Amino acid sequence: MAKISLATIWLDGCSGCHMSFLDMDERFLDLAGQVDILFSPLVDNKVFPDHVDVTLVEGAVSNDSDKKNIAIIRQQSTIVVAFGDCAITANVPGMRNRYPVEAVLQRAYIENAAPPQQRSNGQPSKEGISFHTVPQLARMARPIHECIPVDFFLPGCPPPPRAILYLLTEILAGRTPQMHGWTRFGA
Amino acid sequence: MLAEGINPNATALPATSPAQDHRLRMVNRTMQLYRNEPHGLIETLHTVQESFGYLEEPILRYVAAALQVPLSRVYAVATFYHSFTLRPPGEHTCVICRGTACYIGGSGQILDRIKEKVGIATGETTADGKVSLLEARCLGSCGLAPAGVFDGEVTGKLSPEKVLEKIGRWQHHDPEH
Amino acid sequence: MTLNIEDLQQIARIEKSKKDGFQHRINVCLAAGCLSCGSGLIKEALEKEVTRRGLDSWCKITGVGCLGLCAEGPLLSLPTSGSYYQGVQVSDVPEILDSLNGSPVARLVCPAETPFFQRQVRIVTENCGRIDPERIEEYIAEDGYAGLYQALTQMTPQEIIDQVSGSGLRGRGGAGYPTGLKWMSMAKAMGSTKFIICNGDEGDPGAFMDRSVLESDPHRVIEGMVIAGYATGANQGFIYVRAEYPLAVKRLRLALSQAERMGMIGNNIFNTSFHFNLQVRLGAGAFVCGEETALIASIEGRMGRPRPRPPFPVEFGLWDHPTMINNVETLANIAPIIRRGSQWFAGIGTEKSKGTKVFALAGKVVNTGLIEIPMGTSLRDIVFAIGGGIPQGGRFKAVQTGGPSGGCIPEQFLDMPVDYDSLAQVGSIMGSGGMIVMDASSCMVDVARFFMEFCMSESCGKCVPCRVGTRQIYDILGKITASRATMAEFTMLEDLCDLIKNTSLCGLGQSAPNPVLTTLKYFRDEYLAHIHDRQCLAGACKKAEEVL
Amino acid sequence: MKQHPPKKVRSDLNPSRLLTFKIDDRDVTAHEDETILSVARQNNIIIPTLCHLDGLSERGACRLCIVEVRGSTKLLPACVTFPRQDMEIITNSKRVINYRKKILELLFTERNHVCSVCVANGHCELQNLAVELGVDHVRYPYLYPRHDVDASHSRFCIDHNRCVLCLRCVRVCDEIEGAHTWDIMGRGMTSKVITDLNQPWGTSETCTGCGKCVQVCPTGALTEKGKSVAEMSKRRQFLPYLQMMRGRQGGSWQK
């Protein structure tokens, strides 16, 4: 059987799904014989390849860089899998969606940056957040299928290793994975 | 006078002024009309709103006890129906009709202009407490679209300019209006 | 006090001779439309001027109900000469009185030989604009309560139901259920306590027929209810009216106390053993309370949330007793049917839709106002002949009937007869009778969005498809009008409409997608233009700034 | 909500009729006053439900239990529909399953259901329904409304972000506990369950603190304090018993 090319990526997520992927233990070795991982946080490749057969996308689409990337991923992958709850429901990254971006940033990077007593004047800084070097946060973190068409959904936070393995095995065998009963939201 | 047979644990109202007594009498009268039965709730709330201008929390407690309706049910009814308001209204009220004919006739633009010029959206009151803006579903004055109600008086064939002028006069103490 | 037929006739005679004693009569429209143009002041001025000139016994000023042509208010009618005045101002008063013996004031004359007046057939509104709604005597003088007398003293309940069935009258509130059948099942319902409810919760935006009838001729509705009570074995009635209609409420309450005083309601009506009590109940601003089970909940003092049917209210209604709910206009048809017989009524209208229908004509049409026409009149006649066409040379685009549960009917169906079945065939409904005309300047997607906003904020929130689905549809329509939607969202729109239509709990939810479905069907190109070409064909929608 | 029609007292004078009809092509027999849902369950035919709970009055509102009847395009909620003789009921057609999925997806979009950080994770009826109906993603856009968490009660907590407005809490409080502390304010999307005059739960004068509302809540909206993610499981087997003991079939809470 010809090897398939695989890419994995994480957008706005905690990398927990990738940890679960690694949790396949020795089964990972079997898998390695059947797939080429061309691009992943786990391998050293900085540029998304021109073409991959399967891409697992972890995380929600949360900033302008994610938006660009997800479009490239869709264009250059035959199969896109929404990998884990953040990619499917926006999950924890989506919990900020109820608040304006400015309020979220203020809270995270200014109010909580140092305990109040350690701040010079005990007041939050009035300087805003600069986006010169980091991507601009979108108004909301969104599930990836709201941005691009997605072929398969693998829910779970994280999806259990056996569900990941099942999905890849079915794809390798050219079958359509039936995820029913393998995992669930928040698993 | 409280009707007989009401809940003995009825929450006492705060000390009332003579004017408030009168308003309370109106409320009691409506409740008695329905023999203090729960089905008089909506009519009673209408009377409360007419007499007090809005549904004050102490009155809601009082009505709940008198009609023997659970507190949460009273609150549920008060918020289910759009005629009732839980916030004190401004000195003047401007109701813009959003019925179909008025919408086609441009009531949306009127609301937009009020928001732009006066700075209040539907359900809001100006900071000086002078003017409240409300929307009506349909005043039934479709023949005169777009229509509105200014302090209880229905006026038809409105334009944003007419409405803004009226509100402006309210805000600036024009004695004639 | 209990009257007999002689008393009734006596009252009518006195009233008529009083009327005939005046050389001239001027009727001033005091329905809400004209009142808001200042007709109250005009009536006052007329009365003052008449007294000042010492003409009190020569000219009679009467405040009457709706004259119909609301667009040209304030309206006066001069029954003695048969002419109408429009757009009257207080300053015109002396001139009007001066001209009573001569030729009418030309600049105020409202041409009465127009189709607007001549094409109408008035049954429900026969007294509107002709009698003072605040005086029961005037109603009696127009054969008022004669139908009730006849029903109570000469007919059995079954005979009345047979008359109503034979007339072919169908419910005027929307769905068009045969009234006779409803009365029959109510008469058969088990129970010693039964209720009749008059549904005057006219919540459709763009409809004001019921308001006009209640304001202009409240006794007719009361008479219809008492007859209904006798025919079906109910002794208690409720008239549920929107709180937004204070004038209608006031006149109804007045009419009730008059009817009570004369013994048309209460105990031993017309010396028979029949009792009937009637109360007015106020709505509080909830469209969903037009739904029967929600209306019942509201009268019981609860939130107006519908419950699943069956069981239907005729079995389990108000306080679990059999309850029959009829619309204002339906009940207003009853007395004439009893008086003149079912055959007369069945001779008007089309094969399956009998009688007349009152429409509130509004929107982009010259003669906005209240009209009553025989069933089967074509849309073209309504809009162009009676309505006078589109103002300012505009181009007709669609007519919306049935309010938020109805649909938009395009030009190609203009020659369609207006009856229950034809309207249903093109995806709309008769509804309670709102008819909004739209011209080329209205964007149909925006219109659909307007109605969806209505359904969303009027959804009671009980069942999931209506509560959340209307919001999702509204969001998509908002995106389309802002030219930001994709084809995927367009597909989702159709899918959601289908979901809500098929799975919602009550009629409001099930019909909520109708405005979207009909515009999708007849004005699909407008939707697609917003999506593909990012433009609004009607030029009505503002384009949102491109988002990242 | 009242039971319509109220259950008749069965006696020799008033025997209940037995009906035979079909559910999913199986012949079944039932009394005329049993709902389609209850007959289906007796015959091990699973119909998903959310607002229904044994021991509480029916509401017919979540629309997940809709079924098809052969010869009719109308869909009927199984929890409040009574069978007729020779009716052919289909509980698992593609059509109803698709509708159920969509309704469930709408529910997920309505509030902020973040299973991974929910105390009821693994014990949640909404989550289980997603598994049961094979919902692995939600096609409609999430609405992300802003809702509060009320932790003012000494033992319990309500997170409106997880509420599905099934109103089990309202019904149990009225029908079983008899306190009617809960009700639902507003309408449409702005509906919210409240205690007393929409005040913090901890300040409610009518709440007895019995905790039945917490036990009947299908999701993690009503929870006990001190429970961490996935620790909140509910017990509600007492309900039919209490309903029987209180001798009030259906209760008086109305819609």
Image (tube, coloured by chain):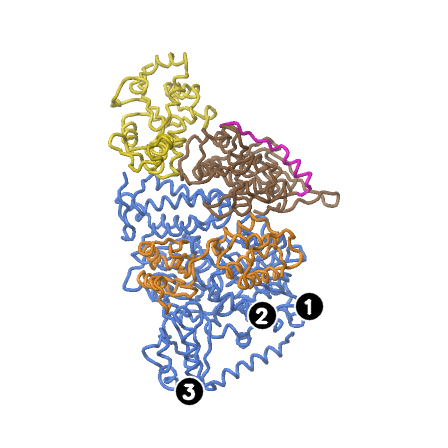
Residue position marked by numbered label 1 in the rendering: C273
Residue position marked by numbered label 3 in the rendering: C53
Q: Residue at x 56, y 67 (%)?
A: C222
Identify the element where label 3 is drawn.
loop
Instruction: Tell whether position D240 is magenta.
Output: yes
Chain B is shown in which shade? orange
Amino acid at the residue labelled 2: Ser
Amino acid at the residue labelled 1: Ser
User: What letter labels the chain drawn in blue?
Assistant: C
Judge left or right: residue B53 versus residue C265: left
In the foreground, A174 or D180 = D180
Image quadrant for the C terminus of chain B?
Answer: bottom left
Q: Nearer the viewer, mark 2 or mark 3?
A: 3
Identify the element where label 1 is drawn.
loop
Q: Residue at x 64, y 36 (%)?
A: D240
Q: CA distance from mark 3 to mark 1?
A: 52 Å
- In the image, residue B42 above or below residue A34: below
The chain holding disc 1 is: C
Image quadrant for the N terminus of chain B?
Answer: bottom right
Chain part drawn in magenta: D229-248
Instruction: Tell whether position A128 is magenta.
Output: no
